[in-house]
Amino acid sequence: MNEFIFPKDNERSKQMAAYMKQLFPFAGVQAPERARLTKDLLKASKRLTFSELIDLVTFYYNKPEREYQYLAIDLATVNVKRLSFEEVLCFKPFVIEKAWWDSVDAWRKFFGLWAFANLEEMPKLFDSFFGAENFWHRRIAINLQLLYKEKTNTVLLKKAIIYDKTTDEFFIQKAIGWSLRQYSKTDPKWVKEIIETTALSPLAVREGSKYLPK
């Protein structure tokens, strides 16, 4: 498979790097254009063996420009439903490499999609992130079921929230609030009870209460 190279847009790359606090260099390719340019590569990746796929993900993830990390995660995500539990876990180390909210939340989508398609194994995947030393891994545990609606395992969601309720990390407290806010669309009573009976941070409460009836 030939190496894919993003075109450079120097002006836009500066803007994108500034938005991401200069943490990463950018080629300057925005999401819609990136999707168009990589469509054929993503389609072709579905014919790869698992070994070939993870090698390709590793190759692009190690390239400097941020768009290549997005591409690597896209490659994993378009193939996620054909992966086994053991294969999915092989992608866990990527979460804390070049980690920031954008890549971590994209990886959360990858793991969340697999778990939703394999609900009987979802608790086992949750346990792989719950209580992890690195807070980015724990953010995935908190937000793993973000779009599960009525299929949310509230026992696991509550477990993740309580574990990190006093963690002094913005991205953890934001994740708690995000998970509560999202689930409040499905079960506002449950979310209200959690907020009223658990000593959550002001940020988590503010975010989690956004859609609750006043």
Image (tube, rainbow, N blue to C red):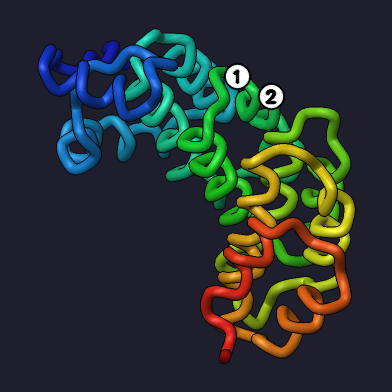
Please say if 190 is above or below 72: below
Q: Position of residue 186 (x, y in %)?
A: 60, 84
Q: Quadrant of the N terminus?
A: top left
Foreground mark, 2 or 1?
Answer: 1
The image's mark for residue 93 is: 2
* Image quadrant assignment for residue 208: bottom right
Is residue 98 in view from this perspective? Answer: yes
* Image quadrant assignment for residue 31: top left
Instruction: Say what amino acid the circle numbered 2 marks.
Output: Pro
Q: As drawn, is 33 to the left or to the right of 52?
A: left
Please say if 169 is above or below 2: below
Is residue 144 in view from this perspective? Answer: no
Residue visible at 33% across and 12% down in the picture = 25
Residue visible at 52% across and 16% down in the picture = 58
Q: Position of residue 127 (x, y in %)?
A: 86, 48
Compare residues 185 and 210 and report the one nearer the observer.
210
Residue that mark 1 sits on: 97
Please say if 29 is above or below 153: above
Compare residues 12 and 140 and report the one nearer the observer.
12
Q: Secondary structure at mark 2?
A: helix
